[in-house]
Image (cartoon, rainbow, N blue to C red):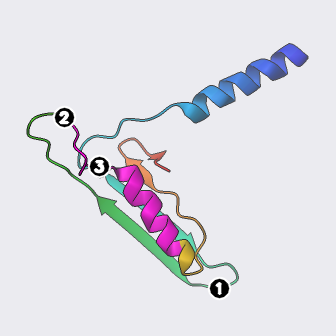
Amino acid sequence: MFASTSAADAAEADSATTTVEFMEGSEFRADARMSESDVMMDVSFKLRVDKPNGYPSAQDITPLEVAEALSALAQSKGWPPLTFYGTPPPVALN
């Protein structure tokens, strides 16, 4: 029994640390609802950074950075944390 539990835990840890590569220009969406009210929010964004020489620069902005910044902004206004999902595939970004 302990061996199967350890294997399941290891598989779950592996899937949690796997990163998904989203295509350039992917759209990311999140929605939230205020607890105990009908107030809802839907947020989406696309980000494209051209890299003519093919190398990332100090000015590169990643979708994860945008998602975390938008979530932090929402939380500062009393909203719950936002989890953005990218398409394709429909996988959580943050």
Mark 1, mark 2: which one is toward the viewer? 2
Q: Can you give x and y, in whole percent of width and height, for residue 72 in the image?
A: 51, 68
Task: Please give the residue where the numbered disc 3 appears in the rendered image.
Answer: 26
What distance separates the C-alpha of mark 2 from that of mark 3? 20 Å
Q: Residue furthest top?
A: 3
Upstream in sequence: badge 1 or badge 2: 1
Task: Please give the residue where the numbered disc 1 appears in the rendered image.
Answer: 37
Q: Residue furthest front?
A: 58
Q: Can you give x and y, in whole percent of width and height, for residue 32 in the image?
A: 54, 70
Upstream in sequence: badge 3 or badge 1: 3
**Vertical comparison of 40 with 94: above or below:** below
What distance separates the C-alpha of mark 3 from that of mark 1? 31 Å
- On screen, residue 52 versus residue 48, left or right, reads left
Element carrying mark 3 = loop
What distance separates the C-alpha of mark 1 from that of mark 2? 47 Å
Mark 2, mark 3: which one is toward the viewer? 2
Q: Amino acid at mark 2?
A: Tyr
Task: Please give the residue where the numbered disc 2 appears in the rendered image.
Answer: 55
- On screen, residue 25 versus residue 67, left or right, reads left
Upstream in sequence: badge 2 or badge 3: 3
Q: Can you give x and y, in whole percent of width and height, for residue 1 in the image?
A: 91, 17
Q: Amino acid at mark 1?
A: Ser
Report the magenta residues as a range: 56-74
The stretch drawn in magenta includes residue 84 = no
